[in-house]
Amino acid sequence: MKRDKLIFSLIEEEQERQETGLELIASENFVSKQVMEAAGSVLTNKYAEGLPGKRYYGGCEVVDEVENIAIERAKELFNAAWVNVQPHSGAQANAAVLLALLNAGDKILGFDLSHGGHLTHGSPVNFSGKLYQPFFYGVDKETGLIDYKNLEKVALKEKPKLIICGASAYSRDWDYKFIRAVADKIGALVMADISHPAGLIARGLLNDPLPHCHVVTSTTHKTLRGPRGGMIMMGQDFENPMGQKTPKGEIRMMSSVLDMAVFPGTQGGPLEHIIAAKAIAFGEALSEGYMKYIIQVKKNAEAMAEAFVERGYQLISGGTDNHMMLIDLRNKNITGKDAENALGEAAITVNKNMVPFDDKSPFVTSGIRVGTAAVTSRGMKEKQMIKIVELIDEVISNPGSASNFKKIRKKVNEMMEKFPLYS
Ligand code: PLP
């Protein structure tokens, strides 16, 4: 077969962009070489509908072993009682859980997208807001923290069947215990979507949702540093959705509902090459090296947040407990869109983001979201975080200056040379 030069030259171009630029998108990271190797392996050739030992295809002996290892490692990592590693993405994991637990038209209560929530938590443009009846809670205008009192008020009034917690742009920890107590008052279920802080939760740096929430979903590619993908988990301590008490056998009853919601409910064949890559990433996340990494991710975010505040930037909630921060740029007289574009010219990648109570559209926005998972994978520490903030500030203070962008791009490129990506 002739090599597809066009596509491979584009892949090289993208590798060059990743190697020479500053990656600050909070949902991105750099996987290890072995994770990439597994994702590009012959396992991509295999169909394996069903679960290990219960497939609809022959020849699954090897992929059964791979998937079982992924499941066991994920259980160990999160202290979970049950895991499904097949969701192709975080959105797919959430779709499966909603399909399993709800009927069309049921009420759900999620974190407002414009305050930092995710599309799959009830947004009207997503299946979750079209098939179900969504209600929302948000953050307090003054503190930028989740308004738990309001969450409880809406929950008691609307009696949703499912409360969803977790976010795409919230820099603080969650009170899962409180949310579960609210849910218990109305007989609701709780789903935590830990896509962003999964790595910090796995290694005990943030509150653990598994003992409190009925179901927990995650992506595998953000702080967890695995291949792009999703997963669904249940903790040791839960009541099943039919309202019967816990003991062991009942875990199976609910898990089979969830398993079936993944396949055949929302997906076809699992991506066994990606599941192999997930297994490797889970193994890595259990290591001492990852523990050091994820502690540094948090330290770097703290250092970066402090440096932004020192330069007069307004961080929603004033700081961060995790790997990210949401910056309101209104006092800097620049929109999120213009900041994203200007920073892009200087080889600094961030994403525009709505801030709570934003007066601009999602295409323009008043803020940017910044995260430290990827730069920490490059080996950067607190000193570099302060330098990064200095560079961002130089761009945002002169957003129309092409010569300034060029100068900063050069500084960024030089900085990144000292932190090689796949050397
Ligand atoms: N849930 C949350 C909280 C997210 O932040 C994201 C992605 O950004 C998703 C779900 C969806 O993940 P995916 O893009 O893998 O579908």
Image: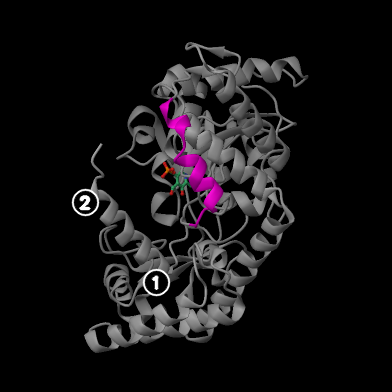
**The label number, if any, that marks residue 200 in the structure image:** none
Q: Quadrant of residue 183?
A: top right
Residue 417, x across and y down, in percent:
46, 76
SS label for mark 2: helix
Provide the residue span drawn in magenta.
29-45
Q: Is mark 2 within 8 Å of ligand 1?
A: no
Question: Which callout, 1 or 2, points at the residue further toward the start of the chain?
Answer: 2
Residue topped by disc 2: 6
- At x 61%, y 65%, the residue is 297
Q: Is residue 242 left or right of residue 12?
A: right
In screen coordinates, is 327 left or right of 253?
Answer: left
The answer to whether mark 1 and mark 2 are in CB contact below 8 A is no
Looking at the image, can residue 230 be seen?
yes
Would residue 313 be seen by someone viewing this image from the given angle?
A: no
The Cα atoms of the two marked residues, 1 and 2, are separated by 21 Å
> Which mark lies nearer to you, 1 or 2?
2
Tag 1: amino acid: Thr
- Residue that carries the numbered disc 1 in the rendered image: 20
Q: Residues within 10 Å of mark 1 (few under 14, many from 20)?
A: many
The quarter of the rendering in which ligand 1 is drawn is top left
At which x and y percent is residue 197? 58, 53
Q: Quadrant of residue 345?
A: bottom left
- What's the residue at 71%, 48% (across, down)? 286
Q: Is residue 75 magenta?
A: no
